[in-house]
Image: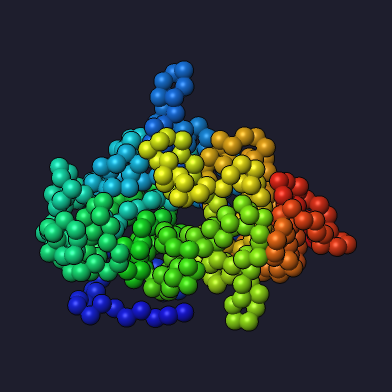
């Protein structure tokens, strides 16, 4: 693990505010047994059209709350809940206005309440904002004491007077200067507002855009029960480094595992699904380095299939997992360490067979006590076959080749190119 030095041009001093003071050893990783449902897809803001007319997306969540709770999910990742220039929510305009294309603030509160005890994970976009009337510095709800000073000086717009960006620049909005105490104070107030409507945790968007130490500070100020960052990179060392930069106070989406698994599923070659760490054979991806901080997933709103021509190019680039291979992918994710995140369309829209398959795997994971730190013994990883024993209690086979864990094992699930066994 690496230690990051702070920035030489400014001292990062926390803003004194009335906040909950968490214990020093808090990591905001959940309890290791969490299971997340991504509760939206890219066009979920359009809601649902039935014979009675359009329903907001929050109303869809409310109507499915019973099924979500029964399935055993512990967290629901909500779509961005603040006013945005783009209907999908990722170009935030007014943080404190919670009426969006997904529904009203009242419906949001009702959805969070209806889902209890499933906890709400807020999608927070803190890297960038746009103004109320322009794409520039006319910020409102909230405004900053000096709006131009809230923008990094190297932002593409040329209107920022703050310090240089602490991460990668993002051209679709004005990059905020998180070294500015006024910005950090406004962020903490915004997160406190989200807590007041019922959210319990944070999904940090585009964390490549600002340094991980600020995620640590925001978590320490607001005490979420769970935190995950979107560090979109297939290099597991870089994702690990980002978690290090937070002081280990956040999990991260396991993009390395996702793309390795995609390649393995679509080529039937699992040779890259194992690697080494400190001389041990371990799973590839972040779960082989830091499994308790790895949120694993198969697809999300950025990688999903999109039928419209406008997104066809992106669809070709992001490469969604096709067809019944979704079942094979979840056989891996739900038997392996990490914190699994299941995509809404896979669970609700891909048909009863896929949903029953996921339900069966969820029950198996819970019954056998698999968790974020479960130990994996990889038996085979090559062309046509991946085979592993997890915690000595669950065996899994993926691919077109046959394999058996031997005597004393009971078949628990057969699916598309996958088999799972259990033993007590």
**Is residue 245 left or right of 366 when viewed as pictured?**
left
Residue 86 appearing in the image: yes
Q: Residue at x 41, y 70 (%)?
A: 242
State which quarter of the image contains the C terminus.
bottom right
Which of the 4 quarters of the picture holds residue 248?
Answer: bottom left
Q: Residue at x 61, y 72 (%)?
A: 275
Residue 58 appearing in the image: no
Q: Position of residue 382 (x, y in %)?
A: 70, 64
Which of the 4 quarters of the picture holds residue 7?
Answer: bottom left
Q: Residue at x 49, y 60 (%)?
A: 255
Q: 43 above or below 172?
A: above
**Is residue 71 left or right of 169 when viewed as pictured?**
right
**Is residue 148 left or right of 220 when viewed as pictured?**
left
Q: Position of residue 336 (x, y in %)?
A: 64, 61
Q: 345 above or below 12?
A: above
Which of the 4 quarters of the picture holds residue 357?
Answer: top right
**Is residue 331 left or right of 40 when viewed as pictured?**
right
């Amino acid at each position: 693990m690496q230690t990051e030095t702070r920035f030489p041009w400014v001292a990062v001093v926390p803003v004194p505010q009335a906040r909950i003071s968490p214990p020093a050893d808090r990591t905001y990783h959940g309890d290791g047994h969490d299971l997340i449902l991504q509760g939206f897809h890219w066009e979920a803001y359009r809601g649902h059209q039935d014979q009675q007319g359009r329903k907001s997306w929050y109303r869809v969540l409310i109507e499915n709350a019973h099924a979500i709770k029964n399935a055993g999910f512990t967290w629901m990742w909500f779509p961005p809940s603040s006013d945005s220039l783009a209907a999908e929510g990722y170009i935030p305009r007014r943080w404190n206005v919670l009426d969006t294309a997904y529904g009203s603030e009242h419906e949001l509160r009702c959805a969070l309440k209806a889902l209890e005890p499933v906890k709400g994970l807020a999608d927070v976009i803190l890297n960038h904002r746009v103004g109320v009337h322009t794409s520039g510095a006319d910020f409102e709800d909230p405004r900053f004491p000096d709006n131009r000073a809230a923008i990094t000086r190297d932002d593409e717009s040329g209107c920022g007077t703050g310090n240089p960006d602490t991460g990668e620049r993002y051209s679709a909005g004005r990059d905020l200067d998180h070294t500015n105490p006024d910005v950090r104070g406004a962020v903490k107030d915004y997160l406190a507002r989200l807590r007041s409507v019922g959210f319990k945790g944070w999904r940090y968007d585009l964390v490549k855009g600002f340094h991980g130490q600020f995620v640590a500070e925001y978590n320490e100020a607001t005490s979420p029960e769970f935190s995950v960052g979107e560090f979109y990179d297939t290099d597991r060392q870089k994702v690990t480094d980002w978690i290090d930069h937070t002081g280990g106070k956040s999990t991260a989406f396991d993009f390395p595992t996702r793309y390795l698994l995609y390649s393995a599923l679509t080529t039937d070659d699992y040779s890259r699904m194992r690697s080494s760490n400190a001389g041990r054979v371990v799973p590839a991806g972040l779960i082989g380095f830091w499994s308790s901080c790895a949120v694993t997933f198969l697809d999300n709103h950025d990688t999903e299939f999109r039928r419209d021509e406008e997104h066809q190019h992106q669809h070709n680039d992001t490469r969604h997992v096709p067809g019944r291979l979704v079942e094979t992918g979840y056989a891996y994710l739900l038997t392996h360490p990490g914190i699994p995140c299941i995509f809404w369309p896979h669970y609700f829209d891909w048909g009863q067979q896929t949903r029953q398959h996921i339900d069966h795997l969820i029950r198996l994971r819970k019954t056998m006590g698999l968790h974020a730190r479960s130990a994996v013994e990889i038996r085979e990883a090559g062309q046509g076959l991946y085979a592993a024993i997890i915690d000595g209690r669950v065996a899994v086979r993926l691919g077109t080749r046959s394999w058996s864990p031997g005597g004393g094992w009971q078949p628990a699930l057969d699916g598309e190119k996958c088999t799972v066994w259990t033993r007590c």
